[in-house]
Image (cartoon, rainbow, N blue to C red):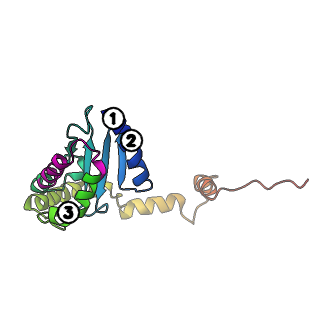
Amino acid sequence: MSCLDQQEEELEVLHSIYDGDGKFKQISPTCFQYKYGEDGEHQSFLVEISWGDSYPEVAPTVNLDLFYNKHILDAVKEKVRSGILEEVENLLSSPMTFSLFEWVKDNLTSLLEEQPQSAPVSQAECKTDTVIEEDSSPEKKKEKKEQMTKAQKRRYSDKYGSNTDRPRGWDWVDVVKHLSQTGSQQPKADS
């Protein structure tokens, strides 16, 4: 059986096994990802396996350097990668993608021993947060509306106060704005 035939057969098997599994994703005809853990967890990561032209006679490429895995410690990535590559050597010349994904699933707790449960807070992160807060405080002051002085308030009330007649249409903008927000409807004519 040629390598291409074995790849096509394994592809069908993977589709039938992982049909409906949201953690499995086919990136291309020869590249597959499987997610371990749940979104938002600090121990969640992706394993990507790519087949070469001579797969399964030649070992597939195992990639853990994905953006999703940026929080995983390098030592943990290397432990997962080396464990998978050891399994690959035992499975050469046979379809192995499913077996490799299952091996990671079976050994997940031992592979993640060094990975902390939650993100550590470093001093650099704390300093960055305070710098951001200091920089954002002047912007907040700029966004504040200016306060009117007593004299300005007096002039405004004299101009549009209740003692004087207001010019025609002084509040039309407010009426139009109100009608546009409420979505006034034209009454329908009875037929």
What's the residue at 58%, 61% (across, down)? 164
Residue 29 showing in the rendered view: no
Distance between the Cα atoms at labels 2 and 3? 27 Å
Camera-nearest label, 2 or 1: 1
| Camera-side mark, 1 or 3 | 1
| Residue 52 position by quadrant | top left
Q: Which residue is mark 2?
A: 9
* Residue with the mark numbered 3: 107
Disc 3 residue type?
Asn
Q: 16 left or right of 133?
A: right
- Residue interval drawn in magenta: 79-98
- Give neighbour class at mark 3: few <14, some 14-19, many 20+ (Cα, 10 Å): few
Question: Which residue is at 86% across, 53% downward?
Answer: 189
**Contact check, label 2 and label 1, Cβ < 8 Å:** yes
Instruction: Reply yes or no: does residue 90 show up in magenta.
Output: yes
Name the residue beneath numbered marker 1. 1
Mark 1 touching mark 3, by CB under 8 A?
A: no
Label whose residue precedes the other's in the sequence (1 or 3) = 1
Identify the residue shown where x is 17% and y is 49%.
90
Give the main secondary structure, helix, strand or loop, of the magenta stretch: helix
Horizontal and vertical percent for residue 113?
13, 66
Placement of 129 over or under 84, stated as above or below: below
